[in-house]
Image: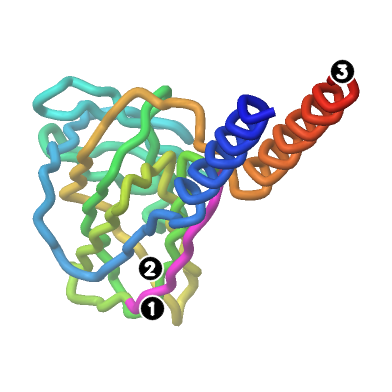
Amino acid sequence: MPQVNKFVMALLAFAVIGLASVSARADIIIATGNNPQPDENVLLNTGQTGTTIFGTTNQTQTSVRFTSNEAITSPAMGQARIQAVDGTLTQLTTDIPGFTFTSLILNIDAATAGSVTFTVTENNAQQTQGTFALGASGQNFFTITAINGQRISSVLFTTTVNMTVTNLDDVAQIRIGGVQPATAPIPEPTTMLLLGSGLAGVAARMRRRKGESE
């Protein structure tokens, strides 16, 4: 019987440790300003056009994907600058196929004042959103950072474009950091609860069988 009790306690301890490891969820911080991170510059080749174009990080030569709901283009060599073909950019998604990352810095050049909404998708499919004001000065830096072990799968920004609201000329000075191959997400707390309950049930059945055989 003592051996069975030890086994039961070990199973329950495993479940508790698993719950503790996922209950303290990591955070995503979306902040205004150019807040230096250990990032790489994203470079683009001139002449790309389409709803999807690619850049390359300047140190590790990692391919970064930019996707929009409209045709976009990279008008100049060197550090990434992305424009809409029609001159008014409404949305842009940044991701790295097969990889996740921990930070993204970009500068949104707005011709008129307005607002922008970021949607950050984490590697466990959870999302964080934030809406911020845009100035018409041409310098609207944003820094997006994952902390506490969290990782980012993609960053989408959207803005309303018309004669009185934001007109985005381009997105420039894009930097990305903490790039690593994507891995399976950590189970959510509900998954761990189910696992713990199942393990406890198995342990209880083992105890009953042990008692019946004695």
Q: Are marks 1 and 2 in contact (CB under 8 Å)?
A: yes
In the depicted structure, whether residue 135 falls above or below residue 67: below
Q: Earlier in the sequence, mark 1 or mark 3?
A: 1
Is residue 52 highlighted in magenta? no
Q: Check disc 1 and report its element: helix, strand or loop.
A: strand
Per the model, the C-alpha gap separating discs 1 and 2 is 8 Å
Which is closer to the viewer, label 3 or label 2? 3
Which quadrant holds residue 82?
A: top left
Q: Position of residue 191 (x, y in %)?
A: 67, 41
**38 sits left or right of 168 in the view:** left
Amino acid at the residue labelled 2 = Asn
- According to the image, label 3 marks what residue? 213
- According to the image, label 1 marks what residue? 114
**176 sits left or right of 146 in the view:** left
Amino acid at the residue labelled 1 = Gly
- According to the image, label 2 marks what residue? 167
For residue 213, say whether it is visible.
Answer: yes
Q: Residue at x 12, y 50 (%)?
A: 37
In the depicted structure, whether residue 138 falls above or below residue 163: above
Which is closer to the viewer, label 1 or label 3? 3
Neighbor class of circle 1 (other Cα within 10 Å; few <14, some 14-19, many 20+) is some
Q: Check disc 3 and report its element: helix, strand or loop.
A: helix
Q: Are marks 1 and 3 in contact (CB under 8 Å)?
A: no
